[in-house]
Image (cartoon, grey):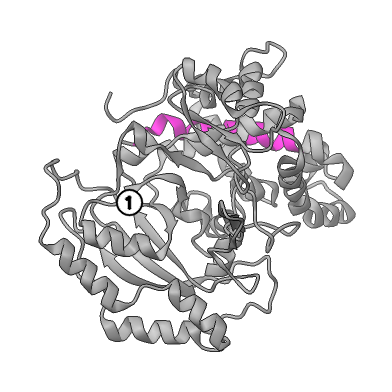
Amino acid sequence: MRDPTYAALVPQLSVALQEAILDLYGPELGITKELRARVDAGTATPEELTTYTRNADKVIDKVKTDMRSTPLDSYSRAQIDIIALANAIHYATFQSRDEPFAKIVPAAEVAKVLKQNEAPRFFGFTASVRYSADLAPDQMVSQFGLDYTTTDNDGNTSTPYLVNGKPQPFVYVMESPMTDDIRRAAKIPFDPRTLGGIEAAAADPGRSDLVRQAARLVSQPDVACVIVRKDAPDAPQDALAEPYRQRGYTVKRGADAPYTGNAMPQFGKGLDGKAVFSDLVQEMNIDTSKGIALGGEGAAIYLVVPKQGSSNTGDPTLPRGSDRVKITGFDGHRWESPVAREQLDRRMEQLLGGFSDADRAELAKRLVTHDTLEAAYTAGAAKELPGAPLKPLAKKGIQDHEAGVKRHIVAQKLGYVVAALRLSDTDKKKQKKKNRAAGDSDRPTAPSKRASSGD
């Protein structure tokens, strides 16, 4: 179950992260902690307000660009602090909220799930639903770095989510309410070079208490897993990872880009150098060799399509939204019969309209037809769910409205840290009142170990 003690960490860690970012990246864009303080106090000049509002997002963009382009073994002390703090906020949020979880899956996985008729299994890289909530399908492809090219052993290349060099206009998403299985199994993926820097920060008496606290939290073996990023030709992957394996960390085989090794998404070509939609840190990884992470009652698979009436000719950095066709749902015992043929066929025809014959043919291969769904469902309907008892009712994911509607919209689109860098006088005043009421003695401290629903 979720652990509310983690939620108490987020405000303190967020302030420390904001200060670390402004210390390192703010001055070159004219945003200092002193300017931020004047903005909060309402004493900034009109010129300073203009500078602040124009450059706040640029600061975050600079953070992400540097984190993607800096070699993993060349992170500065300040960059390691930012990575540790951002991941601590990410993990604390994950452990303290009942947010739905999601994974983009290929078309073949949809039919496979129906045919097996088992509780949905989450594995590999995955994330909370809120990171893609307002995005169009092509934006999801770029958001999560799926606009990549693969090369097989024979040298043949393919682009699973691109057509003619552009993101395809649909994705399949498997979504589930948060379950104890998912919360327990999901770990923060770090390259060992990044994790080594974080461990050093945790033991460094010269670091602030909050930085050391954050570093200790995210470097525990039951919080982090080790995945080598394949950009270390001079150091064999096994040599980098083996010390962590011996210390009890989950170690998985190396991964190419878009994996970054610091849990910060490697945004695809469509978003490179532009404003981004979500938090600094999003990624989690589930290793099925350590146990099955099952979704719960209320899980579903959706075909996500462009929002009707939307256009991709506007600002490419603004979320355009999407419509969803529910392909099937899981009632806790079995998968439901698939969507009606007429509804699915109509959506598919709309999706393929406007493409050339060659592109239509390629896109059609990536869509699951109703005949395929029906055949898979029929094959799976005769199967009973494996003997494990039915999981308890999974709680529905909730949206965080604590900071008011305006702050909510900004946070949903741009992430907590970006929202914190925006003008937020009202939020600050509310927080100060809460702090005065609670008193300094009531401030929470970090849990000494990761919360587990099995404890």
Which image quadrant is residue 447 in?
top left
**Residue 33 in sight:** no
For the N terminus, the image quarter is: top left
Rendered residue at 72%/57% (across/down): 272
Q: Residue at x 10, y 61 (%)?
A: 382
In the figure, residue 123 lies in which quadrant?
A: top left
Q: Secondary structure at mark 1?
A: loop
The stretch in magenta equals 2-21
**Left or right side of 399 for 178:** left
Residue, disc 1: 177
246 relative position to 331: left or right: right
Mainly helix, strand or loop, the magenta region? helix
Q: Amino acid at mark 1?
A: Pro
| Residue 348 pos. (x, y %) | 41, 82
Which residue is nearer to you in this view: 82 or 265? 265
Residue 300 percent across, percent down from the top left: 31, 61
Seen in the picture, residue 427 relative to 200 is either above or below; the reply is below
Closer-to-camera residue (1/440): 1
Q: Quadrant of the C terminus?
A: top left
**Above or below, comparing residue 99 to residue 237 in the picture:** below
> Is residue 438 shown to the viewer in this render?
yes
Rendering coords of residue 445 (x, y %): 49, 21
Between 395 and 116, the one nearer to me in the picture: 116
Q: Is residue 196 left or right of residue 26?
A: left
Q: Is residue 273 above or below residue 364?
A: above
Asked if residue 337 lies in the magenta stretch, the reply is no
